[in-house]
Amino acid sequence: MECHITHTNGKTHSIIAENRHQLPRFEANEGKGVGPRYCPAIEKKVIRFPDKHQHQIWLEPEGIFSFI
């Protein structure tokens, strides 16, 4: 299966910041993921690392037949 990588930019960060009030609240474990394969959602990366100008995003299918 093909997967793709891209990056956020300033416009992406602005959209996320303007819509933070619509994000679901994750309260368990003080809002932190656990485990070796934990990958925070893009909004978490933008919020936690405001000094970064871009963040990696992997575009992966949800399953073998998810493109149908």
Image (tube, grey):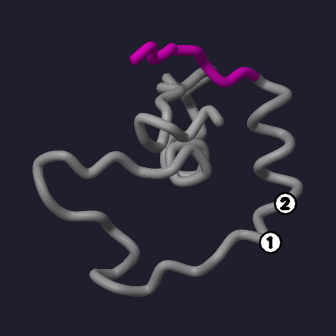
Dot 1 corresponds to which residue?
A: 22
User: Any mark on residue 11, and which?
Assistant: none
Secondary structure of residue under mark 2:
loop
Whether pointer 1 and pointer 2 mark residues with C-beta atoms closer than 8 Å, the reply is: yes
User: Magenta segment range?
Assistant: 1-9
Q: What amino acid is found at the position of numbered circle 2 in the picture?
A: Asn
**Within 10 Å of the Cα at label 2, are there few (<14), some (14-19), or many (20+) other Cα atoms?**
few
> Was residue 33 drawn as part of the magenta stretch in this picture?
no
Report which quarter residue 30 is drawn in: bottom left
**Vertical position of residue 20 compared to residue 60: above or below:** below
Report which quarter residue 19 is drawn in: bottom right
> Residue at point 76% right, 64% down?
20
Label 1 to label 2: alpha-carbon separation: 6 Å
**Within 10 Å of the Cα at label 1, are there few (<14), some (14-19), or many (20+) other Cα atoms?**
few
Residue 39 in the figure: left or right of residue 5: left
Residue 15 in the figure: left or right of residue 38: right
> Residue at point 50% right, 51% down?
41
Secondary structure of residue under mark 1:
helix
**Vertical position of residue 32 compared to residue 9: above or below:** below
Viewer-nearest residue: 55 or 57: 57
Residue farthest to the left, as pictured:
36
Residue 31 in the figure: left or right of residue 53: left
Q: Position of residue 50 (x, y in %)?
A: 59, 40
Viewer-nearest residue: 59 or 13: 59
Q: Position of residue 51 (x, y in %)?
A: 57, 32
Q: Position of residue 47 (x, y in %)?
A: 59, 51
Q: Quadrant of the N terminus?
A: top left
Total numbered circles: 2
Dot 2 corresponds to which residue?
A: 19
> Residue at point 34% right, 46% down?
39
